[in-house]
Every structure is written in structure tokens, then in C-alpha cells.
Amino acid sequence: MSALPRITLKKGKEKPILRGHPWVFSGAVARAEGDLSPGEIGEVYSGDGNFLGIGQFNPHSQIILRMLTRRKEVLDSSFFRERLLLADALRERGLKGKANDYRAINGEGDFLPGLIVDRYGETLVIQFLTAGMDRLKGIFLDLLVKHFNPKSIYERSDVPARKEEGLPEAKGLLYGEEVPESVEIEEYECRFRVDVKKGQKTGFYLDQRENRFSLQEVSQGKKILDCFCYSGGFSIHAGLGGAKEIELIDSSEDALERVKDHFALNHLGKLPAHLIRGDGFEVMRSLDSDYDIVVLDPPPFAKKKAHLPGASRGYKDLNLQAFRLLKREGLLFTFSCSHHMNWDLFQKIVFSAAVDAKRKVQLLGRRGHPIDHPVDLSHPEGEYLRGMVCRAL
Ligand code: SAH
């Protein structure tokens, strides 16, 4: 243990760590001793010399340290296996038999900062977002193979976040059979084909699974607008829930090709579905008011705090259009996946859209992360998905 490199924080900077936050910013560090190459595991001490825990360092990153434990223990394969089992127990209880697409490891939310593992049936897709996790690739591959016995493990570390860690983007097969163009998954009664090699994120928006299902439950006989539809997740659930007509909007041609495939795969070929390729803002403005349900699931508009004012205008505009398009008693499923958009602000934006649209609106419920995207309460930054279901009168 004593051979581990050691970081000492400035006096008074240990508070967040003592409260369980996993990140230390470079400004909080007084002294670093020993081999601190990117990804190295080392000990953390307060300014008073008290042991605070063990984490992974990266001198290239603003987040210089990510905590893994508060105890003096050896961080070997069995340590990480425990974390994997802890994560898996949650999914086993909550999702077994319902869906074979889920996030098996959700980074900080599963106490494994910087590691994402998504499961699509027998295919695992992995992202190493930090230098620390990148160095543990071998350990995690071994653990995942033993635990899940997957056909393939594919890396999708082709994300800009790696740059902040001084890492190049990386992508490719890490284990097992070559991954086909699309991997078939089952989510409740729906079937989807996921392109894990080229699709958005790791191929699918797993975080919306339960929210898609909640749409299914209210879709019987309804005319639905699915704006920012990607490969049609919400619409397929709505179709199987008995929707009578669906219009889908997305700017991605590839996504809309997948929508067509998903309608066929789910035997919804006879359901009137209109696919519109274009900008969600513009297309919505051109539509007439005639919908029972509108789904708004745009990409994140505020990836940085500085983007919030512009993002707020974007969300307001979209929600205003949605209220304009809804029939009396129509439902709006509206989402933000911007980290910096908190619940309070999002609700205010939706409210102000309702006022401008001259609609009286009831909030029926909030919709957030599913259980396979847990958020560590000590790390509220991990929460990003905020959704509201509203009824417009
Ligand atoms: N609801 C989807 C996920 C949507 S992700 C699901 O459950 O799977 C956001 C989508 O918005 C992406 O498919 C992206 O292609 C699309 N998009 C991004 N900018 C857009 C724009 N300006 N107009 C329309 N679609 C856009």
C-alpha cells in the first residue's frame, strides 16, 4: 500500500470527498508524490494528513482524481468483481424477463467512475471514459466475460470526453465474434435492431426504455407525434399499444431507415406512419393541431452551463409548438437530457410554454432515469434525464 502514489489535498478541500463525492478537481490538490502517470491508482489524504481513500489519477484532466474506495484495500480483480455484482443485482431484480437491453454498469452511479457497459442481449458494448478505467481494460474484459458469457464485447470509446482525459477515441471488437450490422433486442414486447458499431450513443437510448413503455400504456386509439424519434423507440411502443396513427420526425436519414425496419419487425406495417426527415423545430411549426399525444425527446441542448440560456429558448420553443399541436386533453411527454437543465428550470420552461400557448396544463408525473441508470446521491451530476408528462386543456 505504502508504495502507492499519494495526493494531498489543500486544507479544507476534503469536504466533498468526506460526503461521498467521487471527484477531486485539480485546484483542490496541494501536493502529489510518486508515479502519477494517467490512470494510476493512488491514495488521497486531507491537508491534515488524514487518509481519505483510494482513487484513479489523471494529471491531464480537470478532474484529477476519481475515488474508488474510502477504505485501505487492494484494488484488484475481486474488488471490481464486487462492484460488478452489486450493479448486476439491481438489474437482475428490476429488469429480468422484461428487457434484454440495459445499462449493466453506469459509471459513477455504480461506483465505477468512467466505465459504461451496455448490454444488448449477448452483445456487450463498453466505454472507457477515463484514463483510470482505460488502464483496467484487461481486468474488466475478463470479469465481463466470466459473468455474462457474451458472444461479443465491442468498444465504443469514440466520445469527445476521452479528449479531456488525454486519450484518443477508440472503437472496435475487444472480445468474441465479429458483431453483425444489427443486434436484435427485446424491450417489453417490442423488438429492435441495434447498430452497436455505428449507431448513436452505444446504438440505442437505453435510458428511455421505461418512459417508452409508459407511452405504450396510454396509446390505444391515439394519433401520436414522435419528435426526435431516432430509430422509433417511442413509436414502436405506441404502435403495440394500439395507436391509430403516428408521425415521426428526425433529422437523421439513417435513423429513419431504422424506423421503417422496426415497424416491419414488430408487424406494424399496416399502421399509418409518416416519417418526416427534417429539423424538429421547423417541421413542428409547419404541422396542424391535431394530435392526442406529442413526444419531445431532443438531443441535449446544454452540454455546458454556458449553453443554458440558448438551450432554454430551444426547449421553450419546442414545448410551445407541442402545446399548440395538442388536442384538448392531449398528452405531452417532454424530455431534457441536458445535464445542466435541472428539474426546477425545466418545469418553469414547460410552464412558460404553456402560458404562451394559452393552454391550461396539468403535470401528471415526472419521468427520469430507469433503475439501470442509477445516480449516486453523492454525485448529483450523474442525473441528466428529466421528463414530464402533462395534459393540456
Ligand atoms: N426518442 C429516441 C431517442 C432520441 S435521441 C429513442 O427513444 O430512441 C435524439 C434524436 O434527435 C436523434 O435521433 C437525432 O438524430 C435527432 N436530432 C438531433 N437534432 C435534430 C433536429 N434539429 N431535428 C430533428 N431531429 C434531430
Image (spheres, grey):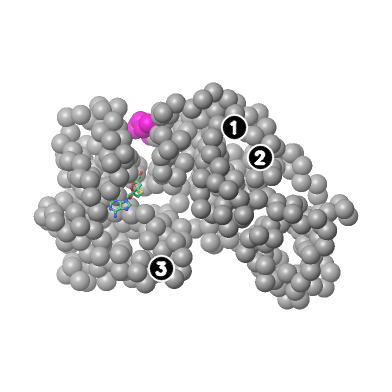
The three-letter code of the residue at mark 2 reads Lys
Residue at 54 percent across and 35 percent down: it is 172
**Which percent across, then down, holds residue 182?**
40, 29
Label placed on residue 307: 3
Q: Are marks 3 and 1 in contact (CB under 8 Å)?
A: no
Q: Residues within 10 Å of mark 1 (few under 14, many from 20)?
A: some
**Which percent across, then down, holds residue 2?**
88, 55
Looking at marks 1 and 2 on the same chain, the residue that comes earlier in the sequence is marked by 2
The reply, left or right, for residue 271 in relation to residue 387 is left
Secondary structure at numbered mark 1 = strand
**Which percent across, then down, holds residue 92?**
55, 36
Query: On the image, numbered disc 2 is attached to which residue?
Result: 137
Label placed on residue 277: none
Q: CA distance from mark 3 to mark 1?
A: 36 Å
Q: Is residue 277 above or below residue 172?
A: below
Q: Which residues are magenta?
A: 188-193
Q: Quadrant of the C terminus?
A: bottom left
Q: Residue furthest bottom?
A: 12
Q: In this orientation, does residue 240 appear?
A: no
The three-letter code of the residue at mark 3 reads His
Secondary structure at numbered mark 2 = helix
The reply, left or right, for residue 184 in relation to residue 56 is left
Q: CA distance from mark 3 to mark 2?
A: 34 Å
- State the residue in front, 132 or 232: 132
Q: Residues within 10 Å of mark 2 (few under 14, many from 20)?
A: some
The three-letter code of the residue at mark 1 reads Leu
Residue at 45 percent across and 51 percent down: it is 369
Residue at 51 percent across and 25 percent down: it is 178
Residue at 60 percent across and 43 percent down: it is 87
